[in-house]
Amino acid sequence: MEISANSPVKFGLLGKSFLTSLAIIVIGCQVVMAQADPQIQKLEAKVDATKLKVEAADAKMFSADSLIQAGEQLIAEGAGDIKTISKEDKDVQKSFSNEMKPIEKALGSRDKDEVKQAKADMKELSGKMKLEVKALDARFKESQKKVESGTKMMEKGKEKLKVAKDAKKLADAAYKDAEKALEKAMKGK
């Protein structure tokens, strides 16, 4: 019998029963494999559970790392603000000193009107200086709070990272043990 690419394959009665028997055997093997040993199913479940624990530990490590990075960023921002505020404070002090020189000179004058005007100018300049210093001081305190918050975040992150690393180590060991037990059980069957 010649079989061409275009002609359908014809099976005799014996061929059909053979294929049917083969299909039944394959399906039967699949059913037997699906109803695997309960011990192996327990081991597979244990492997899955330990894998979830490893993933949870990884997530905790990621969270702790994020907390540390956020703390570092907050510290950097606060430190940068403090430097800027310190420079601005020096500029304000220098400006105040420069503006006070002519007023102090006028206070030494013999003209009463000039002295009176110098005292008024000095009072106005002192008020202006107090407002500027008060604003700088408020910004400085805010920047210090940033640095303190960043430090606390970093400390908290480091503590969480240590705990997460320990949990990860234990979870990895449990996962490896579960995999080895499953492999051993599979080889035994």
Image (cartoon, rainbow, N blue to C red):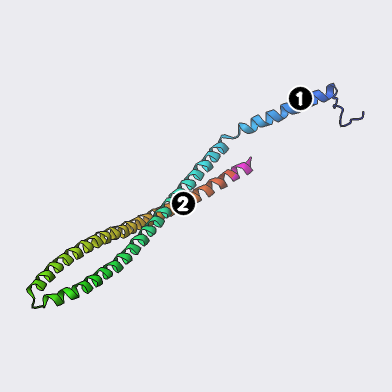
Give percent across and percent down for residue 96. Answer: 22, 70
Q: Position of residue 169 (x, y in %)?
A: 47, 53
> In the image, is 51 to the left or to the right of 164?
right
Q: Give how far across and how far down residue 60 sits, in percent.
A: 43, 49
Q: Amino acid at mark 1?
A: Thr
Taken as a whole, is the magenta stretch helix, strand or loop? helix
**Residue that label 1 marks:** 20
Q: CA separation, marks 1 and 2?
A: 52 Å
Q: Point out which mark residue 138 bears.
A: none
The N terminus appears in which quarter of the rendering? Answer: top right
- Can you say which quadrant of the picture contains the C terminus? top right
**Residue at (49%, 43%) from the top-left corner?**
52
Quick one: label 2, few (<14), some, or many (20+) residues within 10 Å?
A: many
Residue at position x 28%, y 60% from top? 144
Would you say residue 166 is visible in this rendering? no
Which span is picked out in magenta? Answer: 183-189
Amino acid tagged 2: Lys
Between residues 64 and 86, which one lies in front from this camera angle?
86
23 or 79: which is nearer to us? 79
